[in-house]
Amino acid sequence: MPAPALTPLAAAVLAAGEPERVLEVECGSGDATLFLAREFPRARVRGVDRSEQAVREATARVGLDPEGRVAFKLGRPRSLPFPEGHFDLVVLVDGAPAATEAARVLRPGGKLVLAYTKYSRAPRGLRGWLLRRGLAGAGFESVAVAEVGDGSFSVACLRGGDPAGAAD
């Protein structure tokens, strides 16, 4: 069972399909990235953070991973160190998305999950605005939005692909 802070993310992944490649942006020490690796056991999961210390801490938590399924890398939300169309799912917990950059690294039909916990600094009104304005302008369509426990989540699909998110 996920920690209470991950409850909105746990609810959101139910609408994420079965991704093959997953990215968590601003991963910190890797809690959500490791949760995603457990939720999607066949996916390659990457975490990106701007802090070298956070990347070191997260990497130390991976443990035995002979297949290299989970890895962490330095990067910023507005300049992700990955090629265009590389991921099926991009996740951000308690942050404001860089919608254009998320769209760049997602394949058409890929999903963007925004999960907000009770620790989020983004006010609820701003969360709705981000989804409607920022994400729609970058080519995303809303799939699901819900309040869960002490938090909320939004799932959006990048236009141009299979809305069910099935892998090719």
Image (tube, helix red, strand yellow):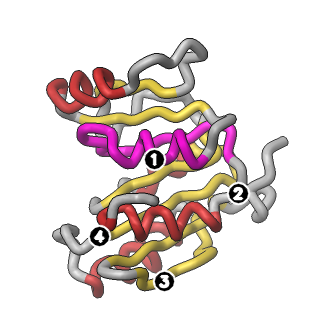
Looking at marks 3 and 1 on the same chain, the residue that comes earlier in the sequence is marked by 1
Looking at marks 1 and 2 on the same chain, the residue that comes earlier in the sequence is marked by 2
SS assignment at label 3: strand
Question: Does residue 48 lie above or below 122 as drawn?
Answer: above
Q: How far apart are marks 4 and 3 (CA)?
A: 12 Å
Question: Does residue 60 lie above or below 163 as drawn?
Answer: above
107 sits left or right of 1 in the view: right
SS assignment at label 2: loop
Residue 84 at x, y percent in the picture: 58, 34
| Residue closest to the far top | 66
Q: Distance between the residues labelled 4 and 1?
A: 15 Å
Q: Does residue 21 show up magenta in the picture?
A: yes
- Give the label on residue 35, or none: 1
Q: What residue type is labelled 4?
A: Thr
Looking at marks 4 and 1 on the same chain, the residue that comes earlier in the sequence is marked by 1
Residue 85: in sight, yes or no? Answer: no
- Give the label on residue 17, or none: 2
- Give the label on residue 146, or none: 3
Residue 10: in sight, yes or no? Answer: yes
Q: Which amino acid does label 1 sit on?
A: Phe
| Residue closest to the far right | 168
Instruction: Specify the segment rendered in magenta.
Output: 19-39
